[in-house]
Image (cartoon, rainbow, N blue to C red):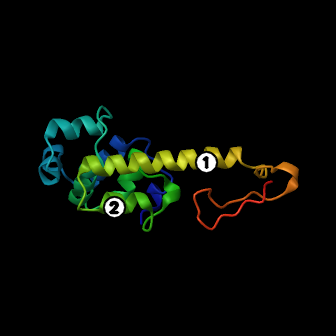
Amino acid sequence: MAIGKVGKTVETLGDYLKEQRTTARLSLRQLADQAGVSNPYLSQIERGLRKPSAEVLSQIAKALRISAEQLYIRAGILSPEDGVGGSVELAILGDTGLTERQKQSLLDVYASFLALNAADESDSLEEPELPATESGQGTDVQSEHDPNHVTTEG
C-alpha cells in the first residue's frame, strides 16, 4: 500500500472512476468495451454528467476489478454505514433474478420505509395512549355475531 495515497480523497464518482481507470492503465475506450457501455456514455459518467445504474456500475467494477460496493457508495446507492455484506441493498443489487428497474424500485421502497420509520420513531418518543373505556371497565371483545356471545345489559 502506497503511503502517499492515504490522505488523498476523491470527491465524485466520476473522479474516482477516472482514477481507477488510469491506475488500471485502461483508456476510456478500452474500459467502455470491457464494461459493455458506449465510450460517450462512460465519458459522461466520468465527467459527472450522467448517473449510472447499479447494473452499469457493477459492469464497470468488474472490468476494473474493483469492489462494486465502493462504486455504489460513491454513487450514493449505498451509504458507508451499510458496510459490505449482509445489507438489504447489497442483497437486492446482487440478485440476478431481478431486472435493473425492479432492483431500483425495491431500493426506493426500502429507502422510503426506512425514512417513514425514522419519522415515526421521532414522533413516538412518548408512551402511546391506550383507548379509554367507559366507567373504567374492560371492553367486550366478542362479536355480536358470535353465537356464544352473551350480553349482560338489561
Q: Nearer the viewer, residue 150 or 86?
A: 150
Q: Residue furthest top?
A: 49
Res 139 → quadrant: bottom right
**Horizontal and vertical percent for residue 115?**
55, 45
The secondary structure type at the circle numbered 1 is: helix
The secondary structure type at the circle numbered 2 is: loop
The residues bearing labels 1 and 2 have C-alpha atoms spaced at a distance of 30 Å
Q: Nearer the viewer, residue 31 or 7?
A: 31
Q: Which residue is mark 1?
A: 118
Q: Quadrant of the N terminus?
A: bottom left
Instruction: Identify which amino acid the numbered label 2 is placed on.
Output: Ser
Q: Is residue 90 above or below residue 78?
A: below
Q: Earlier in the sequence, mark 1 or mark 2?
A: 2
**Horizontal and vertical percent for residue 48?**
33, 34
Q: Which mark is residue 145?
A: none
Left or right, 139 with respect to 63, comes to right
Q: Which residue is mark 2?
A: 67
**Horizontal and vertical percent for residue 52?**
28, 42
> Can the viewer see residue 22 in this picture?
no
Residue shown at the point (38%, 60%) measured from the top left? 90
